[in-house]
Amino acid sequence: MTFTHRHLLGIEPLHPAEITAILDLADDYVALNRSGDKHSDALKGLTQINMFFENSTRTQASFELAGKRLGADVMNMAMQSSSVKKGETLVDTALTLNAMHPDLLVVRHPSSGAVDLLAQKVNCAVLNAGDGKHEHPTQALLDALTIRRKKGRLHRLSVAICGDIAHSRVARSNLILLGKMENRVRLIGPPTLMPAGVAEFGCEVFDDMREGLEGADVVMMLRLQKERMDGGFIPSEREYYHRYGLDAEKLAYAKPDAIVMHPGPMNRGVEIDGTIADDINRSVIQEQVEMGVAVRMAAMDLLARNLKTARAA
Ligand code: NCD
């Protein structure tokens, strides 16, 4: 067994071989998802609860579909109408759910570290579906699978991550993963949207798109996280688009076969030009969504195997 963790809380604790193990299994699930019978029994008899304390479209749908295709009983908690609104703490909510014997808990929360805290209180496998500005491991894994399939490898690539780095758990998880797999990562964005201590990440930092994109194999765009900003980080969206929005002219600085990625949801005309996003020769945004289901199936399958082993012991 190459993947021995109880939870998937972030990319940080993973060994490169574990990342490869998840991606290899996800490749099998891509094939299953493209076949006529999209069904396996990997999670048969297990209960999966999705708790999303923050809005989500693709991540929640993807986890739900992944669980159902693997045969789990899947429940989506509507957190907006839950007792959280009556003042129940995160830990109390988790303990209540824990008493119902779930096997997999998928959690998204606006506070960094909230999912780790919750994982310490329950006796099932916990998957982090995004915690504040901290980590979004399945996003980085689905991005990695997309890159590996498109570029034929996941090492020695030049990857430009552009935009609102400071508020992005997607950027953080990707940065960690791509670094572990020995790629060259460049961060591009206005200095106001670079995290403090960015120099320690060991990657190059640019505030000019054309310089930063020069020779890139992969161009990863990020959404401006307006909900996590409490002041004037950018002069205006128009000005931002002019300097940092990905359009054909700026993309021409990357390699001719560079792929364009975006985790979604996209703000067309803010961080990316709609024509680039829709260009099937450059944009892999739809593939990212497809890979998302497969990666989540792989992650839940591996965690369920470890859960069964631990319970049998
Ligand atoms: C991302 C998220 O929620 O962190 N979306 C996603 O999971 N696909 C990125 C974002 O919200 O900008």
Image (cartoon, helix red, strand yellow):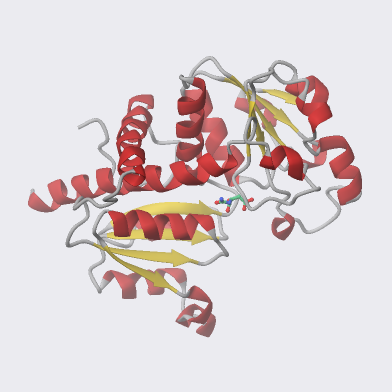
Residue at (58% x, 54% y) in the render: 132
Percent x, y for residue 157? 56, 18
Quadrant showing the N terminus: top left
Q: How many marks?
A: 0
Q: Relative to 99, is 120 above or below?
A: above
Q: Residue at x 62, y 21 (%)?
A: 217
Q: Residue at x 52, y 27 (%)?
A: 178
Residue 90: image location, x then y, percent? 45, 69
Q: Position of residue 101 (x, y in %)?
A: 22, 68
Q: Is residue 172 visible?
A: yes
Look at 35% across and 46% down and name the residue there.
Answer: 33
The reply to whether residue 113 is in sight is no
Residue that sits furthest to the front in the current view: 36
**In this rendering, would 161 be left or right of 13?**
right
- Residue 133 screen position, x and y as percent: 60, 49
Side (left or right) of 77 relative to 225: left
Q: Is residue 309 above or below residue 22?
A: below
Q: Nearer the viewer, residue 213 or 203?
A: 213
- 246 left or right, relative to 169: right
Q: Is residue 20 above or below residue 32?
A: above
